[in-house]
Image (cartoon, rainbow, N blue to C red):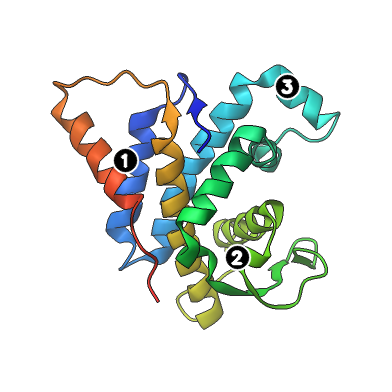
Amino acid sequence: MSNFTLKELNFARIRQWIIDAKAKQDTDSVYSFIAAWIGFNHFYGTFASTQKKNFLTWLNGRHSGDRAQLMYLIQTKEFVEFFDVFKSKHQKLFSIEITLPVINPLKEQGVPDNLKGNYKLSDLPINQIFEVIYQIRNNLFHGDKDPFRDERDKELSQFGSEFMLLLTSNLLLRTYGEEEDAFDKQQQEEIEIVKKITKATPKD
């Protein structure tokens, strides 16, 4: 599995979001998904900022916002290699079926384009997987989903929570650059908790 080196990353901050997301997973999947996403957001934002020259070249004049930072990360060789191994190790996660498209209410279009029906995650390329999850995130952030009353919105939130917890914890585990202190009990305990989360199995 490809590894990242990212000394600028706040490892403790991401671990805290992951641990909080895991604690709320069974009782509040919306919060759990958002918390795990915030940790991931810090990762891809930091990654883009540390590769500013390459990022700006890749942008080629396009908007350099949050979505662009995400899409820049997932197309890199390091991430593609990481994701391939992640996918092979978590086949149960990728056997989850979701009904597509997820609607982008602002543009009044489905995400991804031209897909309709039930699809396993394993049927989708990497860019479509993250387009779907990013749209679920947007819809929650902007109040366009009601997981408290709508069963589909609830299922999408639960899926988002499961996917992002496993992804972000595994990604952090494969990232180097943190100065570890064997005498820092809290740091060591949090690292062990995240390691356990990387091995969690999605619910049926």
User: What residue is at 79 percent from the left and 29 percent from the top?
Assistant: 58
Q: Answer above or below: position of 184 versus 100.
A: above
In the rendered image, residue 163, in percent from the top left (x then y), is placed at 48, 58
Give the quadrant of residue 177.
top left
- Give the residue number, with chain letter if any, for mark 1: 16
Of circles 3 and 1, the one toward us is 3
Residue found 51% across the figure and 55% down from its top:
88
Residue 114 on image: x %, y %:
83, 69
> Residue flagged by tag 2: what amino acid is it?
Leu
Q: Is residue 79 visible?
A: yes
Q: Can you identify the residue that label 2 sits on?
A: 121
Tell me the number on the disc at residue 131: none
Contact between labelled residues 2 and 3, with CB atoms less than 8 Å apart: no
Which of marks 2 and 3 precedes in the sequence?
Answer: 3
Say which label, 3 or 1, has the lower sequence index.
Answer: 1
Secondary structure type for disc 3: helix
Mark 1 falls on what kind of element?
A: helix
* Residue 2 shown left or right of residue 80 in the figure: left
Please identify the quarter of the rendering in which residue 141 is found.
Answer: bottom right
**Quarter-wise, where is residue 16 in the image?**
top left
Mark 2–mark 1 Cα distance, whole angstroms, equals: 27 Å
Q: Disc 3 marks which amino acid?
A: Asn
Q: Which residue is mark 3?
A: 54
Q: Amino acid at mark 1?
A: Gln
Q: In terms of sequence position, does the residue under pointer 2 or pointer 1 come before the other?
A: 1
Q: Which residue is located at x 70 percent, y 39 percent?
A: 75
